[in-house]
Amino acid sequence: MSATAVDHHAADSRTVARGTATGSGLTFGGVLRSEWIKLRTLRSTFWSYVLIILLTIGLALLIAAAQRAPGTAPGTPSGATAATLTAAAQQARWITDATLGINFAQLVVAVLGALVITGEYSTGMIRSSFAAVPARLPVIFAKALVFGVSSFIVSLFSLVVAALVIVPVLQGHDIHPDLGDGAAWLALVGGAGYLALVGVIAMGIGLLVRSSAAGIASAVGLLLIVPIVLRIVGGVTSALWPGNIASFLPSEAGGRLFAYPITQPAAPAGVVVLDTWQSLAVLVAWAVVAVGIGCVLVKRRDA
Amino acid sequence: MIEAVGLSKRYGQKVAVDDVSFTVKPGMVTGFLGPNGAGKSTTMRLIVGLDRPTSGRVTVNGANYVNLRAPLREVGVLLDAKAVHTGRTAENHLLALGATHGIGRTRVDEVIALTGLESVARRRVGGFSLGMGQRLGIAAALLGDPGVLILDEPVNGLDPEGVIWVRELTRHLASEGRTIFLSSHLMSEMAQTADHIIVLGRGRVIADAPVATIEALAAGDVVTVRTPDATRLAALLADAGITVTATEPELLQVSGLPAPRIGELAAQHGIVLHELTPVVGSLEDAYLALTQDEVEYHAGKMVTA
């Protein structure tokens, strides 16, 4: 054991005497690789992604199969029967079914997003991370990038598989999805982008609060509780502003991202309706602001 | 080379490190000694930029740690064994840390072998004993083969064999010209490992000297005197401004006057001495003497700051 030490250090004695670093130093590429190793070597990552895949595909199959005969289909937009659905409405139904699982997958990805950063704080790992990368922010950027891209790929895979496996089921109900429809695939990409951004927003929140419990509660609260509260306030006061604020929440803006672009009835005056690109901008802004504030604190706080 | 100049750290009202200046030189083991809560860990966190100093500065190899281009290759740090994600295996922890600096599996396997972690490398760290955690922390510190090593309580939790291993490893690394900065609250451990000792008490440096000097501070300083005429001798010494403690009716502990002078004084006044023994101080005694007034919490009672 100590013989190894002697051999090794003897070989390196010159560099030690110089007291300078040799070989490759600290690089952002290295930090990215480090964050990738960190992400894939935790069981929570594996189980969360498995859960997202199963939820997305499973729920899509369930809802598609549940639409039994024309006329009795639940959740059909405008209550039309399948027999009378236009081509666009059939596409909308297909995508609505394929993306149903996002409502649940978003909670999983939010929990995982909070955990990837709060797990480092609660275990003390963050001190090792910041000692290795004293500038600190590269760790945060690399983590957001690696986690965001991984979540996007897993989500896109889940949604595409979900969309494909329900095609025969829907055909059995006289709904015939058009696989050559670019808008449909774009909606799936939007859904994957939404899940990835929700994860990054949750990571930003985790960075602010540094505790797993608080991080998960805040992220899930933002996705589930805040919209409900605003809806209640809107219902009680009959005012438009709670609904207009809600339009800018991640969950609401995200819904626009993966909705099939079917012609919407004109919104009443004073009601904000975001289009797809505006929704994307709103979501990106959430992520940038959450991670940005987190970065300011990370630079200022003691680790 | 680590240099601290006027380094201070305050957490709210609490002063953890108070205007500390010292230099840790290469080629030797420098012990950083102090009771728990003296500010050793805080000082070490300040060195590697995890905490920001309230005032003053500290540099490693002449540069601010935050500005180092390859921190892991210049400074290895064991802050505490808990700075590891418990859900990851030891091997993956080291791979993730090394990846930031382009340090790959070859070196990771080397440090695993060097620290004797082969059998547990693929187990999750959550199940590690304190000693295994320490070995993993030391493995992480050695990853970049750095010229400066900062080890906070490295022998904490190690079995006797591990303690000897750390001692030999640090001595060996110092002999290669590296800078070794090692903290402990155990004087006996320092006496066997360090060449130079910085003693910290309540955030202040209260001694900064070679081990031999620290030991000499205590050696010869205290003399045990046994005499049937203890009361009279004590009075004579007290008149001369010497500190005397009566431990038994006929036994005095005299500090601040060498044994020959005590003998001469007794002879002048016709006092019979049965014993006159300079107490050879151990490093432990010196340490206790140095930190006695600086320990924040004495056993049994709390001292208001």
Image (tube, coloured by chain):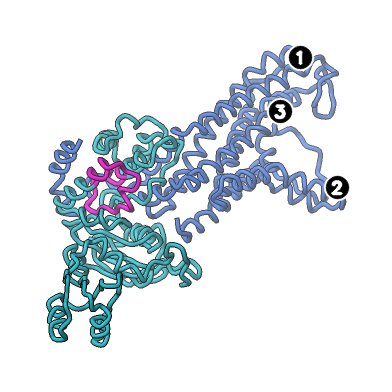
Chain colours: A blue, B cyan
Q: Which residue is mark 1?
A: A174
Check disc 3 and report the residue beneath it.
Answer: A96
Res. B66 in view: no
| Element at label 3 | helix
Residues at discs 3 and 2 both on one chain: yes
Q: Quadrant of residue B9?
A: bottom left
Instruction: Write down the chain letter for disc 1.
Output: A
* Three-letter amino acid code of the residue under disc 1: Asp
Instruction: From the top left corner, tell me how far across and down residue B139 is, in percent.
Output: 29, 42
Residue A235 shows which numbered tag?
2
Report the span colored magenta: B138-166
Badge 3 or badge 2: first in the primary sequence: 3
- Residue B191 is situated, as x and y percent measured from the top left of the image, at 22, 57
Q: B127 or A90: nearer the eye?
A: B127
Q: Which corner quadrant of the image does residue A111 belong to?
A: top right
Q: Residue furthest top?
A: A172
Nearer to us: label 1 or label 3: 3
Could you tell which of marks 1 and 3 lies nearer the N-terminus?
Answer: 3
Which label sits in the foreground, 1 or 2?
2
Horizontally, is A61 left or right of B219 in the view? right
- Identify the residue shown where x is 26% and y is 49%: B73
Label 2 chain ID: A
Indicate the amino acid at tag 2.
Answer: Gly
Foreground of the two, B296 or A257? B296
* Apparent side of residue A234 relative to residue A202 in the rendered image (left or right): right
The quarter of the rendered structure image containing the N terminus of chain B is bottom left
